[in-house]
Amino acid sequence: MTTRCRIAPSPTGPLHIGTARTALFNYLFARRTGGTFVLRLEDTDQARSTVEHEQDILDGLHWLGIDWDEGPGVDSGPARGDFGPYRQSERGDRYAAAIERLLAEDMAYPCFCSAQEREADRAANPGISGYSGRCAHLSEDEREARRAEGRPSVIRFRIGEGAVEFDDLVRGHVSIDTSQLGGDLVIARSDGSPLYHFVVVIDDIAMRISHVIRGEDHLSNTPKHVLLFHAFGAQPPIFAHLPLILNPDRSKMSKRKSQTAVAAYREQGYIPEAVVNHLALLGWSSGDDEDLFSLADLEARFDLDRVQPSGAIFDVERLDWLNGQWIRRLTPHVLAERALPFLKRSLAVAAQDGHRVRTPTLERLAPLVPMVVERLPRLDAIGPMLDFVFIDDLDIDASQLVPKRWDAATTVTGLAEVRRLIEAAGPERFDGDDLEPPMRVLCEGRGWKVGDLFMTVRVAVTGRTATPPLFDVMAAIGYDTTLARLRAAHDLLTQDTREDR
RNA sequence: GCCGCAUUCGUCUAGAGGCCCAGGACACCGCCCUCUCAAGGCGGAGAUCACCGGUUCGAAUCCGGUAUGCGGUACCA
């Protein structure tokens, strides 16, 4: 039997980190077993589902590199695969037929209870939880009478008695008594639309799903699904309930307490390689002392046997580290391509603040990338790291220009000396090999700390105290601009000195 | 409340009776490297394996109970 598994997101919100992790594990399991991975949109909640969210989910999955074999095409083309359509909103006739079948076999029945009646029954029997079964054994005449009164009705599936047992690949044998299921299950609303617990089973049967891999939050509801499978004479799939991804306080990861949208991570400059790696390590481990796994590595090594049963906190600091690791593994060209939008964004902000900014291009950014790779925990760190190359009118903080051990006069001298030195070397010899030795000699002669001189120059040409290596930075800025900025810094300080007097 | 699941360093985890007075990684601290910031190297601190009993010559690993946490309990998914 070839394995078939699926991810069934609901487009009632943007792609959630937890959904992405579940999608990843399903995808990996399918790849690992040579099976099929299906994407199915669970949009039965028409009120909350939107096409924007649907697109966000599709985009997010693609971004992560998680491709599906069957399901809606991202270009809104026709659904691929033999078991479509893959949007539940387009499968209404199937659900209606399934409900008819249950009704005909008396495995389900119409229930006319109002919210007040259900409330009253519950109050009358504090011991039992859920639905009382008031409408479970109405005669056809009684049903007709209620319909004649115009009372709305939902459809309930008979839960029955006894224990439901199943084997979970992550948790082992699970047994839950039907008395704990909350009574007969509503499978269709009074407007006739089917509910989640019902459609999920109908579709899993129709789509021949062999393995249901999902979050632990579905574990307690699984008996309902098992019963439904039996009702249709279908063998339940094999279940694997994944540990939940948690907020730092160990509750289920939520938008309220954590950043849950995959798109938000993308916008902050996390790269898909790192997100996939991090997600994989939330609940799964290789067994070896390795931490870095590409999607391809995971496809070759993933195994449900090595999935942990207990929940895992989403540790952003670990994600940050992984992100830095994967950024460093990108080729310079790819890194430049991916970082360019972030640089542009940050320069746009500078332009808005009134700065004269030159537009960065791939050609200009690519050669600069090697000097910043190991300084980027996230792509959005590119701005502060290189903006001075593209901003013509830098804001220089005079106080930062003067090292702690120096005074303004020394700084002015230092700046002037370095300028002289650069001019003496000339534009043809404008690099570290030619400039660094004389600068060190200069320090030695004056009794200066090399770091102090370098810091002054750094602030003068970049406006920042933390930058890539000085001579790389000056090369990026260019001979003329470097000299101009050294002069400007010099002028700034001499003005200040005069004002002080 | 009821039911279910879980419980190894702050975090993610290794561990499937002796190899473990518990290993790795992130974070943290120190040192080295060093023009700043990083990156990197080396080292350190950090877990009486939730607790209590039991089985066994021997338990983080098996069994029972307790506690705690989380999840489920909708005409949401």
Image (spheres, coloured by chain):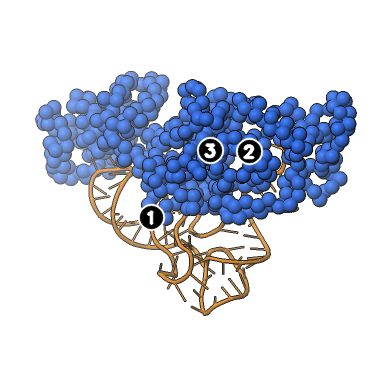
Chain colours: A blue, B orange
> Few, some or many C-alpha atoms within 10 Å of disc 3 (few <14, some 14-19, many ≥20)?
many
Residue lying at 49% horizontally and 22% vertically, measured from the top left: A77
Residue sitting nearer the eye, B23 or A24 = A24
Residue lying at 60% horizontally and 32% vertically, measured from the top left: A42
Q: Is residue A75 visible?
A: yes
Residue located beneath label 2 in the image? A201
Residues marked 2 and 1 touching at CB (< 8 Å): no
Dot 2: chain letter: A
Dot 3: chain letter: A
Residue sitting nearer the eye, A161 or A16 = A161
> Few, some or many C-alpha atoms within 10 Å of disc 1 (few <14, some 14-19, many ≥20)?
few
Residue located beneath label 1 in the image? A289
Three-letter amino acid code at disc 2? Val
**In this rendering, would B37 be left or right of A454?**
right
| N-terminal label among 3 and 1 | 3
Count of marks overlaid on the render: 3
Residue B5, percent from left and from top: 61, 54
Residue A484, percent from left and from top: 22, 25
Q: In which quarter of the view is residue A33 placed?
A: top left
Q: Is residue A487 visible?
A: no
* Marks 3, 1: nearer the viewer: 3
B22 versus A11 height, above or below: below
Q: How far, Cα to Cα, is label 2 from label 3?
A: 12 Å
Q: Are marks 2 and 1 on the same chain?
A: yes
Residue A6 — which label? 3
Three-letter amino acid code at disc 1? Asp
**In this rendering, would B72 be left or right of A30?**
right
Q: Are marks 2 and 3 on the same chain?
A: yes
Residue lying at 63% horizontally and 42% vertically, measured from the top left: A234
Q: How far, Cα to Cα, is label 3 from label 1?
A: 30 Å
